[in-house]
Image: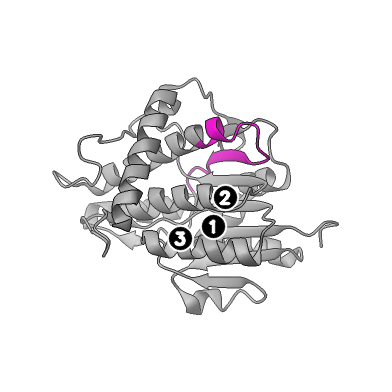
Amino acid sequence: MTSTAKTIVISGGTDGMGRALAATYLDRGDTVVVIGRDAAKAATLPGAHVIPADLSLVSENRRIVEEINARHPAVDALVLCARYFRSSRFVTAEGVEGVFALEYLSRFILSHGLTAPGVIVNVSGPGVPMGRIHWDDLMLEHGYEGVAAQMQAGRANDLLAVAYAARQATGPTRYVLINPGPVATSFAGEYDPPTAAHVATLKRHGRPVGEGIEPIIARIDAPPAAPLTAFARFAPINLDDSAFDPHAATRLHDLTHHLLASLEN
């Protein structure tokens, strides 16, 4: 048990790396809040505070924010792990493209909604060169492709972090982007045959999950001093890269607010 118990909130905490992180901190005696769809898997994490939710829905994320802020007003770490690959385009009941909804909008709402967590660790793919925002087609209605959706979500998280840090620079929260590299995790998703074959190779050759979560644990246990940092495992990523362009970050931040406001009507 740690000398000072922490409160850790993990989205996507019922499977893969999120689950391994939850188990690690439960073993230490910390308070762990797990958010995920699979209640049966969550039930196998004894001691976890489980919030069943569909994180692809904006309304569910808002409900989660209210519940956590009411029950756990002092959160030491928010860890954003939820992902689900889709080879075929899927639109949520709220009319949002599924990958964008789960892997970006959920992380945006949780990041901005929780009351001043000590550190936010966004497990994504910071700085990946092929990631780009489809400014004229955020919902990827034209020529959807699963990898493109995933790459857009990754770049959106880069920009989310930049905009968050710019607005919260004097606040207590440290924002950390982490690319854990190839990890033999569950790779939850709906895959076409070529992508499924690639995923099978990643599972064979990726790092074990226990090793994959080590850089995440390091940033939870000792958050960096700077408002924003990014890492490829333990190696710092240069934030001067175009992936972290502040003008694009502001543009996406404003577009996101407009989108979320439209979903309220």
Q: Which residue is mark 1?
A: 17
Q: Which residue is mark 2?
A: 212
Identify the mark nearer the N-term, 3 or 1. 1
Q: Secondary structure at mark 2?
A: helix
Quadrant showing the C terminus: bottom left
Structural crowding at the residue carrying mark 1, measured as other residues with C-alpha within 10 Å and reported as few (<14), some (14–19) or many (≥20): many
Q: What residue lies at 31% left-to-right and 47% top-to-bottom?
A: 259
* Side of 16 relative to 118 (left or right): left
Q: Residue furthest left?
A: 142
Residue kind at label 2, given as amino acid type: Gly
Q: Position of residue 116 (x, y in %)?
A: 63, 48
Magenta-drawn stretch contains 17:
no
Q: Secondary structure at mark 3?
A: helix
Residue kind at label 1, given as amino acid type: Met
Q: Position of residue 113 (x, y in %)?
A: 52, 52
Structural crowding at the residue carrying mark 2, measured as other residues with C-alpha within 10 Å and reported as few (<14), some (14–19) or many (≥20): many
Q: Which residue is mark 3?
A: 62
Q: Residue furthest top?
A: 240
Q: CA distance from mark 3 to mark 2?
A: 30 Å
Q: Compared to 1, does 45 lie above or below? A: below
Q: Compared to 54, does 202 lie above or below? A: above
Residue 69 appears in the picture as rendered? yes
Number of numbered markers: 3
Q: Which residues are magenta?
A: 164-182
